[in-house]
């Protein structure tokens, strides 16, 4: 009991008979409740809408809006708000009808005050338990959601998921995710529903409230009929019942805002909705910042890798653009072979860097127009090992070492440097080998002109099982025949 009372529960007594209303109010006040009173159903509706009532005790027979009408309205408005019906006509039918419509309990006149106290107490405890259940289930969902968000690195996916989750958790009718551009102007990144016109969120009301929440670094909640909006903000649009906007903040800056609405005819967002979405918005802001950072690091990573590849190609006038083309081939081929996104990323960078070891091979050998001597060829053959050693010292390139080292191994074990065969050769290196060889055959070289694609394809077919993994060659030839982009 003390737990319920400590929340200063607001109980509304509705009865058109003043003496009964007086009696109930007086008794409940003595019990420590914060008591409101209404002499009609219509008056009760206004009080419920404005005051956040925790329990309604209503007479069933009143002129105008009856207790049953009020009960139906309350169950539409907030299905968790308990209603105890009081009736002077103790028929079972009336009680059953009220219970069917969602009344928590009923009391018959004349009242036994102790019975009233007990039923009110039970109803309030029940409401509290229901609220805690909702909070618990929302917290479980929130935990799942934040786990998903923190594992997503693709920014558009992350934004869409954040908005979808928020709408679902808060049971909103619509929403929008807005971010600041480099000129500190808000733009709409995502809307819910996805095909909702972004111009809707450009209206003065949403822009002003979004700017307010971002500027004050705190959420803002507005609801129809309430006068509690901060000064200077436009009025809540007529068709909106309830509106909340949360700033998306990191310790360093505000990234943007999350807007949610419930339209006219719905219940306003509850304090639980506000608390849950506030936690979600804080967690999501960090995930969004991390994803942006991750992409920025990846961009720099790619630029560094490209720089390495260009450094090699600068020594060898005939191989200009070779690494980029090998990279394109390997990516398309790896996708066709069903490699994971992470493996594709790895093979992409390996494609760019596969010949990095040529940086240690003499330019005279690399650019020699005629046939290479055995010694010169032995020198060239050092480049996979040299390349692997160069990148093994770079932490973020380390995982590419096996691909670089083995890109000249032959499927039958007759390649170099380690003469390994079949599955001993990393799959990525087998893919790289096909892409590299095809690109080399179809490009000009110091000692020969570029070979037509048909002829290069024939060589790939002929070398299936000897130099190349047959499965990889088949996939590559299929890509060539279908004219897939990049190949
Ligand atoms: Fe190579």
Image (cartoon, rainbow, N blue to C red):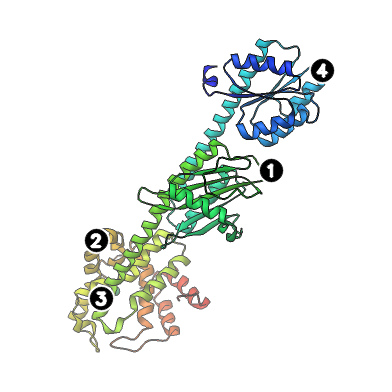
Quadrant field for ligand 1: bottom left
Q: Secondary structure at mark 1?
A: loop
Lower position in the chain sequence, tag 3 or tag 2: 3
Estimate the spatial distance between the alpha carbons at disc 2 and disc 1, rounded to whole Å: 61 Å
Report the side of 42 relative to 248 (left or right): right
Quarter of the picture holding the N terminus: top right
- Give residue 303's position: percent from left, percent from top: 32, 68
Lower position in the chain sequence, tag 2 or tag 1: 1
Lower position in the chain sequence, tag 3 or tag 4: 4
- For disc 3, the marked residue is 312
- For disc 2, the marked residue is 394
Q: Secondary structure at mark 2?
A: loop
Q: Name the residue at 48% across, 42% down.
A: 278
Residue closer to the observer: 222 or 141: 222
Lower position in the chain sequence, tag 4 or tag 1: 4
Kindly check if marks 1 and 3 are in contact, taking CB atoms under 8 A apart as contact.
Answer: no
- For disc 4, the marked residue is 91
Look at the image and tell me whether residue 406 can be seen: no
Kindly check if marks 3 and 2 are in contact, taking CB atoms under 8 A apart as contact.
Answer: no
Q: Name the residue at 54% across, 36% down.
A: 271
Residue closer to the observer: 201 or 413: 201
């Amino acid at each position: 009991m003390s737990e319920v009372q400590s929340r200063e529960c607001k109980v509304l007594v509705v009865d058109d008979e003043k003496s009964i209303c007086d009696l109930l109010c007086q008794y409940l006040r003595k019990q420590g409740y914060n008591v409101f009173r209404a002499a009609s159903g219509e008056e009760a509706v206004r009080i419920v809408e404005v005051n956040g009532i925790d329990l309604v005790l209503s007479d069933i027979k009143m002129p105008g809006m009856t207790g049953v009408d009020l009960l139906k309205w309350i169950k539409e408005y907030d299905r968790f708000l308990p209603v105890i019906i009081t009736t002077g006509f103790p028929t079972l039918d009336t009680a059953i009808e009220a219970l069917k419509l969602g009344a928590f309990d009923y009391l018959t006149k004349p009242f036994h005050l102790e019975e009233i106290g007990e039923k009110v107490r039970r109803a309030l405890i029940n409401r509290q338990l229901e609220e805690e259940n909702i909070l618990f289930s929302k917290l479980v969902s929130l935990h799942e959601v934040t786990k998903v968000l923190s594992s997503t690195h693709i920014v558009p996916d992350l934004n869409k998921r954040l908005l979808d989750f928020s709408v679902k958790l808060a049971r909103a009718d619509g929403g929008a995710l807005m971010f600041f551009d480099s000129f500190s102007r808000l733009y709409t990144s995502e809307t819910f529903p996805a095909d909702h016109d972004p111009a809707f969120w450009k209206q003065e009301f949403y822009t002003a409230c979004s700017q307010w929440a971002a500027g004050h670094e705190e959420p803002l909640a507005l609801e129809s009929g309430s006068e509690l909006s901060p000064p200077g903000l436009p009025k809540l649009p007529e068709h909106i019942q309830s509106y909340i906007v949360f700033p998306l903040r990191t310790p360093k800056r505000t990234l943007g805002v999350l807007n949610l609405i419930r339209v006219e005819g719905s219940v306003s967002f509850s304090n639980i909705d506000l608390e849950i979405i506030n936690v979600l918005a804080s967690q999501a802001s960090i995930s969004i910042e991390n994803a942006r950072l991750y992409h920025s690091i990846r961009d720099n990573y790619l630029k560094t890798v490209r720089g390495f590849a260009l450094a090699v190609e600068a020594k060898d006038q005939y191989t200009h653009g070779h690494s980029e083309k090998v990279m394109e081939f390997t990516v398309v081929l790896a996708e066709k072979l069903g490699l994971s996104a992470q493996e594709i990323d790895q093979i992409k960078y390996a494609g760019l860097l596969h010949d990095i070891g040529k940086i240690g091979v003499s330019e005279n050998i690399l650019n020699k127009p005629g046939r290479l001597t055995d010694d010169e060829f032995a020198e060239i053959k050092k480049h996979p090992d040299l390349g692997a050693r160069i990148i093994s010292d770079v932490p973020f390139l380390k995982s590419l070492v096996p691909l670089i080292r083995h890109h000249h191994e032959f499927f039958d074990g007759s390649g170099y440097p380690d003469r390994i065969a079949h599955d001993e050769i990393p799959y990525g290196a087998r893919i790289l080998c096909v892409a590299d060889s095809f690109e080399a055959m179809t490009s000009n070289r110091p000692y020969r002109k570029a070979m037509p694609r048909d002829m290069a394809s024939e060589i790939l077919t002929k070398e299936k099982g000897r130099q190349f993994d047959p499965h990889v060659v088949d996939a590559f030839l299929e890509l060539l025949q279908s004219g897939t982009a990049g190949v």
